[in-house]
Each structure stands twice: as structure tokens, then as C-alpha cells.
Amino acid sequence: MNDRFLRACRREPVDRTPVWFMRQAGRYMAEYQAIRKKHSILEVCKTPELAAEVTLQPIERFPLDAAIIFADILLPLDAMGLQLEFIESKGPVFHKPVRVENDIQQLIPVDGESFAYAGEAIRLARQALADRVPLIGFAGAPFTLASYAIEGGSSRDYMRTKDMMFARPDLWHTLLTKLSNAVIEYLNVQIRAGAQAIQLFDSWVGCLSPDDYEEYVLPHTQRIFSALESKGIPKIYFGTGTATLLPLMRKAGCDVMGLDWRVRLDEAWATIGYDLAVQGNLDPLILAAPLPEIKRRVQRILAQANGRAGHIFNLGHGILPHIPVESVDATIEYVHQLSVREVGA
Ligand code: CP3
């Protein structure tokens, strides 16, 4: 198997820097759009054969070093009864958002059974991958999930979320405990089914101050990482806008820290500590720039990683729908070309 990705997660030397992209299966690929013409996003997520097929699409098309299972962080909220719908041009909407104490009491408790389809999708994807590259499982982190549950969809200022956090910390912690329980079940289903690494997406946690992260979020992320039946598989923790939160986020107990483009990779790594691996951190919009500019930016990130064991190349956030596939190809080639080294040298 091409195990560059797993080796880098463990901070072992690799022959080239491994690379994969968040949202690497998505609308920028014609193959993905063809499937989406026939099936809604929820259908794809909940039909193991379709989820596995879409997971493999970028692997068949590009020389990526890891696959990520096709799913969505919002699925556990749907299972808990919030009634998720993806509305074209609007994004995700929850028809039953969490606003008051009673809403939290009414959340449906979930167990492994609730996520049987996710386990089956992982098994099918592992089979189809046939050990070409490792498969990453994932879930949303409780803060980011709470923001969707409370706001009822995407948000800019997280007003209702912070209202509950600051005015009713008792409700906040009850909600985050329930969300964390669901995340633990969801991730353990994926691990048991054969996920070879997991990533926790805390996409919007960067809207918090360090003190609030520590008080209202960290105890929950810590509990999640320590409750995983991970048997040594790498655990990645990712967020955006996290420059000032990184020293606290590392206390959550991950092996790899995801970085967005707002930080310099070398400075962030020094802050976090070299006993953790790092993943990142090209601005996703650089992929829309001319190829020589992409190459210059790839080179810069690799120079900041400085050949140190434990760097996984990725974007600082998900790939966007208008990115040309040729640029994705070129980026992967630049990463591999510019990072060639002798293992053990
Ligand atoms: O990385 C991968 O290839 C795996 C697939 C994946 C999806 N969602 C599929 C998807 C992953 C890892 C996610 C995670 C996810 N989902 C996050 C965390 C990462 C991030 O981007 O911050 C978040 C916040 C969500 C919630 C979500 N799902 C939103 C806000 C949207 C709509 C946005 C849009 O672009 O329309 C989704 C839908 C979604 N999930 C799409 C994909 C490929 C696009 C929808 C489509 O196919 O029409």
C-alpha cells in the first residue's frame, strides 16, 4: 500500500510529502456532478454503494495519497431528529433547530445502529480501494455541529450559538455532551468498519476566544478523542481561523493538527510543538491561479515544512466547485516532485 499518508501522520520519514484535499470528492469533478444529477446529496451519503463510488472518484482520477469517505458532518444531527435538508443555493437547513431546553431534551439518542450505513460505506470503499491508499473517516466536532443545530443552518456571526453558550452554560454543556456522544458513536462505527485515520472537523471554532474555547469546548473535544476505539490510528483535528487557539486545540489529544492558510506553517508548527504532525495549508483559492503561481505557493509551504517528518500537504479548507481539474492534477504533481527525498537520508 502507498502508506506515505499514515507514515507522515506518525511523523515517520517518507519518500515524498503525502497530499490529499478536503472535499476532494465534489462538484469540481464531472464524475461527481453526473452522480448528483440522479441523486440528492443525502441519498449519496446514505446509500453505501453510491458513497463508496464517489469516494473512489478522485482516487481514480488523481495520484492522491489518501481517500476520505464521502459523507457529511451534519448526518448525526439528522439522525438526532433535526430534519436536515440541503437546499440548492442556500446550503444545509435544519427544520427543527435547537433553541430551548425542551429541544435538547427531545434529541433522539443515537447508537451504532443509527450509523449502520456509514460502516457499510467504509467497508465497500476499503474493498474498492484494495489497499491502494488509506481511507480517512470523519465527523464534525461538537462546537461546529452545535452552531448548525442552533442557528438552523450556516451562519456568519454565530449569534444564537454564543447566546446559549454565554447565557445558559448549563444547556450548552448538556447539548455538547449529547452531540459528543453521537460523534463518538459515529466515529467508532467508522473505525470498526476499517477507517485507517479519522478527522474531526471543527470548521467554525475559530470564532471563539481562547478562553471561551478552553471553557466551553475543550472538555468535549478531549472526551471525544479519548473515547475513540482508535487502536493507534491517527487522529486529525481541523479548524479554520484557529491561529490563537492552536496551543489549546493540541490539548484535545490529536496526533495531527490541521492548519488553515491564515497561519504560516513553520510558525504554527513551532507553536504547536514538533511532537505533533501538521496538515495544510494552501489557500483553496490558489488553485484558481495560474499554474506557475500554484507551484510557487506549493514550494513555499514545502520550504516551511523544511523536510521535517510529519507534514501532510492539504488545502487550508475544502476545494471549491470552480477549480479546474488540471490545477488539481498539477498541484499534486508539484507536491510530489518538489518534495522527493531519500528515506532515511
Ligand atoms: O472531503 C470529502 O471529499 C468528503 C466529503 C465531505 C462533504 N462534506 C461532502 C459534501 C466532507 C468532509 C464534508 C464536511 C463538511 N460538511 C463540513 C466540514 C468541512 C468544511 O468544509 O468546513 C461542513 C461545514 C459541512 C456542512 C455542509 N455540507 C455545507 C455547509 C454544505 C453546503 C455547502 C455547498 O457547497 O453547497 C454541505 C454539502 C456538501 N457536503 C457538499 C459536499 C461535496 C456539496 C453539496 C453538493 O454536492 O451539492
Image (cartoon, rainbow, N blue to C red):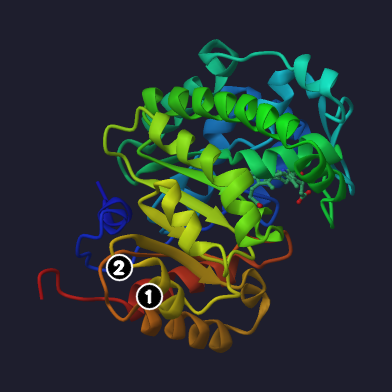
Where residue 126 sits in the image (x, y, percent)?
A: 38, 32
Identify the residue shown where x is 62% and y is 38%: 142
Answer with the quarter of the image where residue 105 lies. Answer: top right
Identify the residue shown where x is 54% and y is 34%: 53
Are circles 1 and 2 on residues that touch, CB within 8 Å? yes
In the image, residue 207 above or below residue 282: above
Answer with the quarter of the image where residue 240 lies. Answer: bottom right
Q: Is residue 285 visible?
A: yes
Q: Which residue is mark 2?
A: 274
Identify the residue shown where x is 61% and y is 35%: 71
Identify the residue shown where x is 45% and y is 46%: 67
Q: Which residue is mark 1?
A: 270
Where residue 172 sits in the image (x, y, percent)?
A: 72, 34
Please rate how many residues cluster around mark 1, counting C-alpha atoms within 10 Å: few if below 14, some from 14 to 19, many from 20: few
What's the residue type where badge 2 is placed?
A: Tyr
Where residue 18 sits in the image (x, y, percent)?
A: 35, 62
**Which secondary structure lies at badge 2?**
loop
**Which secondary structure lies at badge 1?**
helix
Name, please, the residue furthest toward the top.
Answer: 113
In the image, residue 246 above or below residue 253: below
Please indicate whether residue 77 sits to the left or right of residue 110 in the image.
right
Question: Is the C-beta of the residue carrying label 2 under 8 Å from the nearest atom of ligand 1?
Answer: no
Where residue 340 sits in the image (x, y, percent)?
A: 26, 76
What's the residue type where badge 1 is placed?
A: Ala
